[in-house]
Amino acid sequence: MDIMSSFSVFGGTLLSLLSSPSNIILLIGASFAGIIFGALPGLTATLGVALLTTLTYGMDVNTALIALLGLYVGAIYGGSYPAILINIPGTAAAAATSLDGYPLALKGQGGRALGLTTTASLIGTLMGILVLVIAAPWVAKMALQFTSFEFFLLALFGILISGTLTSPDLVIKGWIAGLLGLAVSTIGRDPLQFFPRFTFDMPNLDQGLEVVPVLIGAFGIPQVIRALRNKESLGAMQDFGRILPEWSTLFRNRKNISRSSMIGIGIGAVPGIGEDIAGWVSYGAAKNTSSHPETFGTGEPEGIIASETANNACIGGALIPLLTLGIPGSPPAAMLLGALMLHGITPGPMIVVEDPDFLIEVTAILVLCSIAMWVNGMFLAKQVVKVLSIPAPIFLPVVTLMCILGSYALGLNIFNLYMMVLVGLIAYFLGEMQYPISPLVIGVILGPMADENLRRALMVSEGSLMPFLERPVSILLLLVIVLVLLSKVPQYQLVKAWLMKKLGFDSNKVTGA
Amino acid sequence: MLPEQLMALRRADLKTSIVLIVLSSLMIIESFNFPLTDSYAGVTNAWYVSPALFPILIASILLVCGVALFLKAMVFVKSHAGTASSKESAESWGRFFLLVSLIAGQVYGWVPIVDFALSAFLFLFLFIFSFYSDDISIQKKTLWLWSTLSIVLIIISQFFTPSEEGRFLLDWLVVGVIGVILLLTKGWAKQTQTDKAWRSSWKAALIVTVIACPVFRLGMLVPLPTEGLVIEKMVDAKYAVRDMWRGK
């Protein structure tokens, strides 16, 4: 598709979406709901997308995407409200924002901080979209050359890298979480011969576990239990004046914005790790490159801009592997994958062949969502703040009821509810023992892909593993997987340090330690 | 992380690793009951077509990881034998059991058998009241009350299949139970001076139920898990109003 026809599809999609008043209401409403989901501590973008998926079941794909992406973009941005006003990040993505946002609010400049986060989030999202629209067709074209060997390794890579990077404790726990997800995905009839595996003669398990109730359970129930069990309390709400975009400060930070956007997009594109890591890495990079790093943590606008630009840029980055390879780049993107499959769309390289306009349509919807987020942020901030005053013991039971309704509504099967609670409790205990939940969820989603492609690959090679070592992309993926595994083995670190010493490199100088 | 917390975590890792080892071993044993060779798309009797291949592969890696975690945790626990483990307070465990009882009771006990609007109202009311009042005595009483009622409902749904009339009778009984619980909790609220929390709780529960049920059932046409006394009447009322509107 040439650039002119892409622009015409883009413009046409924008016009057709904007010509319907119901779409505009839905866009503003979903974005506002997203901001509230992000702003309320205990709720996350992933849970918001999970719950909204149920409500979009009867909608056409574009309308459903307006709702889901509107909520996703809004929720990532919304986490900055409590981070700035009460020093409690609404989502993990906004954790770095609170370091400078709250001190700025204490100085009576809460409105300024919110203005900066709103506009930085808009710029970050737009940068992410720009890279998505440029990179996605290339990645998809390249992925069209992939065979079962590459797809199996890609699924393995996604789970492994997500487990490695998101584990808060031992790395092995991240891998175990991913493997547990893969194990759960084997329940039900197998994708090739339809042989019932681990169904124990229960007809409800024949089709395997439904992804959406599993995701709602994994992300929703632990949040409710954790917040109410630990009695998470909020700080004193700070006043804020008028919210202004403050273009001059943003212009002075153009380098910071560009760097943070690239960090956000890059981290977003890595399977399974999301906005929270992007925010922290970008904040760290801004501090390290700043001429006055000592002011970070005392209300430095540079810090707020860095973390908010990066976490929103991550959205576009996370959509690149999702749309082109069918591998989610972040936890909310994993939920989005479930929602797309529910609407009969299977993201992956074939999407550019089967529906060449889809990427452009998603881009147009994302642009609208980011504008809606900005408008909501600039004009409805006071209303969002009012919602923040609702105590957690009131809104979390309501969220639990929505989890129940959401899990039931998709398959109209009470068995899904039983599974949702069971998965929720297991996810809660795993979380308490410092196991990351994202690899588990990604394992559940990518399991069937890994299973089917491994067997198809072996069928093509008649049981030989050699093609894994003969195909260039396959070798590259294998190398990365082996390196990721080795990098976590203590003996490898010792050998690496010894080699560096032999070669004349001082590892301390290299790492800056 | 404090040394006591780390010790508690490693002790928990020990238990988890044992669970993982047992689970993955059972998975491998069960997988060996699947056909170990199979045929597909012209490939006949090949091991790599077997539906057992992927589960055995995953379970084997999981087993190795479980053993590695066990060894790591064991080494830590042995080398820090003098360090005590941190423990969650009894109050925190009380809140946890109440949360599990509320959620599991609603899903396994109430939802399959009681009209959704009635069960949702009672669930929300007790959930909000017990945590919004933030009083341990109320939380303890709620735990016992809700658990008992939920267990009774689980027994009813497992051992009896109530007829249509039986279900309506049960719904009327639940209406009575709701009335009794409202009065009972009002008494608890007076004793603990949490009247404001009691009022906010029933109002919030009522508002959410009144909005959520029609939105899902009438707006999105999603049938609710159990439709009885309230939901069926609500649907009947919708069609009656529609017929009146159309002049039938």
Image (cartoon, rainbow, N blue to C red):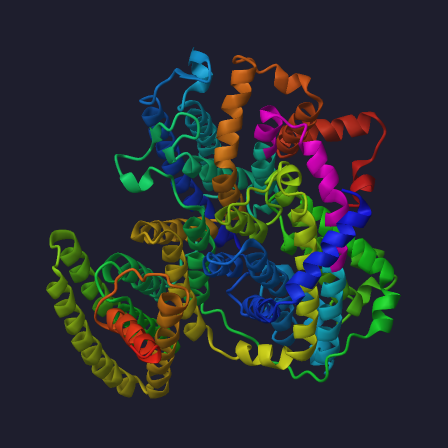
Among all residues in the image, which is located at the extreme front?
B248
Rendering coords of residue A341 (x, y %): 51, 46
Q: In this view of the protein, can residue B78 be seen by the observer?
A: no
Q: Position of A80 compared to B71: left or right?
A: right
Give residue A153's quadrant in the image: top right
Considering the image in quadrants, where does the C terminus of chain A appear?
top right
User: Is residue A129 covered in magenta?
Assistant: yes
Q: Position of A105 compared to A57: left or right?
A: right
Q: What is the magenta range?
A: A126-154
Q: Residue at x 72, y 52 (%)?
A: A9
Q: Residue at x 47, y 77 (%)?
A: A391
A96 relative to A433, above or below: below
Considering the image in quadrants, where does the N terminus of chain A appear?
top right
Rendering coords of residue A304 (x, y %): 74, 66
Number of marks drawn: 0
B173 relative to A242, above or below: above
User: Is residue B148 covered in magenta?
Assistant: no
Give residue B211's quadrant in the image: bottom left
Rendering coords of residue A327 (x, y %): 59, 41
Q: In this view of the protein, can residue A160 be seen by the observer?
A: yes
B29 relative to A261, above or below: above
Give residue A282's quadrant in the image: bottom right
Rendering coords of residue A260 (x, y %): 77, 56
Q: Which residue occupies the foreground of this view, A280 or B102?
A: B102
Magenta span: chief secondary structure: helix
